[in-house]
Amino acid sequence: MQSLFKNKTQAYVTVAETKASLQHKRIEEIALINQNRVMESFSAHQVADFHFTPSTGYGYDDAGRDTLEKIYADVFGAEAGLVRSQIVSGTHAIAIALFGVLRPGDELLYITGTPYDTLEEIVGIRGNSSGSLKDFNIEYQKVDLKNNAMDKDAIKAAVSSKTKMIGIQRSKGYGDRPSLCIEEIEDVIAFVKSIKPDVVVFVDNCYGEFVETREPCHVGADLIAGSLIKNPGGGIAKTGGYLVGRADLVELASYRLAAPGIGAEGGASLHTLLDMYQGFFLAPHVVAQSVKGAIYTAALLEEVGMKTEPASNEIRTDLIQAVHFKTADQMVSFCQAIQHASPVNAHVTPTPSYMPGYADDVIMAAGTFVQGASIELTADGPLRPPYAAYVQGGLTYEHVKLAVTKAVEKTFID
């Protein structure tokens, strides 16, 4: 078969695919387990055609919406769920969780260091703090990681009588640290509960769903949140977010999303249900495609001398693949090449620019069918040293392989 790449590039590709092959087999086994759990839940809840029927107006008695929320809770190991198209993003889902549960005088303690950039204005550590947790007299503290691990001694010293919620960010986001595997989350949840049994443990689960065979609620998390245009939407859901966890906490979150007295009872599904059901069914497979693509990306970039996090032989817990470039120009060139190998807006050349919620200019390659969908192949990052692009998503392994290889060829071989 004729190669799609230059001879030198093809040599790198062959080595990279050989390096990635063992990891790829493991990912396929995880996908099978997760797919079975989703299938069993669909069957147990007797999903039928009428569950895809839109509701309008107030959205009362929406059987399709309510059943989907039970499926999310079931699959993710929780008591209850809130899965709504009215949730704008993962950041919005997290804000609903924080504002729904916390009250003036309470403290939110993040034990994974400073949270993702878009949360800084929510907790009130950047911007004018208007409307933030700080504005409502809800305190925010953090405990930095120590040697890339959660610092138990510092956590124990930081937990106080006013600590209402512990925050854990599973994925590295734009941070220079490893993402947290479920086993690590399980260990630290047991630890903080031994210090303060009634503390609410919240996990930002964005980018992590279906990458492992367990989710944070399976190991003791009280509440988790994420976005439907990331993993659980399977590339089909066009908008929305979710929260699952303890029934009382999900109810409080629903009051924040809607209003006290309405909560989860209101909210028309319109024409979103079919996409949400089908996307969730496809999610284990699509996530596996993305993770296989991330492993290949790491392997190929390692072959041309770049530092990658995680490395191609490391176990995965999310979609995020960080690649460290030596210069800003390399990073920009790589991201532009990813854009030019996208199915949508391939003719567009992205440039670093301001994005709401971020402190630095961001270069973002995102030629996606759904605007901002991180389950589709994107490459982006703030233009600040160290120059790291975060490559994530990919609906098919083939697309990731083609796009990343062409980007490597343009940036390092042409």
Image (spheres, helix red, strand yellow):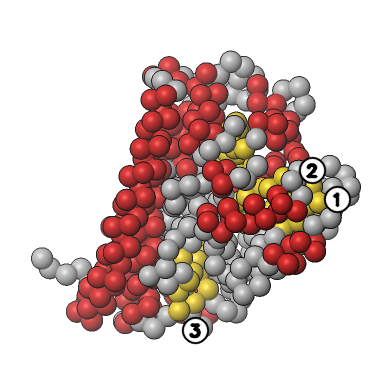
Q: What residue type is labelled 2?
A: Leu
Against 87, residue 266 (above or below) is: above
Name which of mark 3 and mark 2 comes first in the sequence.
2
Q: Which residue lies furthest to the front in this view?
A: 194
Q: In this view, does 334 lie to the left or right of 19?
A: right
Q: What element carries label 1?
A: loop
Q: What residue type is labelled 3?
A: Lys
User: Which is more foreground, mark 3 or mark 2?
Assistant: 2
Q: In this view, does 45 lie to the left or right of 130?
A: left
Q: Give how far across and how far down residue 112 sits, in percent.
A: 66, 62
Q: Is residue 324 left or right of residue 292?
A: right
Against 258, residue 113 (above or below) is: below
Q: Quadrant of the C terminus?
A: bottom left
Q: Decide: few, some or many residues near mark 1? Use Cα within 10 Å; few <14, some 14-19, many ≥20.
A: some
Among the 4 quarters of the image, the one containing residue 12: bottom left
Q: What element carries label 3?
A: loop
Check residue 186 in the rendering and tell me which mark sits there, or answer none.
Answer: none
Q: Do the residues labelled 1 and 2 touch (CB within 8 Å)?
A: no
User: Which is more foreground, mark 1 or mark 2?
Assistant: 1
Q: What element carries label 2?
A: loop
Name the residue nearer the viewer: 244 or 159.
159
Q: Mark 2 points at which residue?
A: 102
Name the residue nearer the viewer: 339 or 200.
200
Q: Give how far across and how far down residue 67 sits, in percent.
A: 51, 24
Q: Decide: few, some or many residues near mark 2? Use Cα within 10 Å; few <14, some 14-19, many ≥20.
A: many
Name the residue nearer the viewer: 236 or 99.
99
Q: Name the residue under label 1.
A: 162
Q: Give how far across and how far down residue 357 sits, in percent.
A: 68, 58
Q: Give how far across and how far down residue 259 sits, in percent.
A: 75, 28
Among the 4 quarters of the image, the one containing residue 333: bottom left
Name which of mark 1 and mark 2 comes first in the sequence.
2
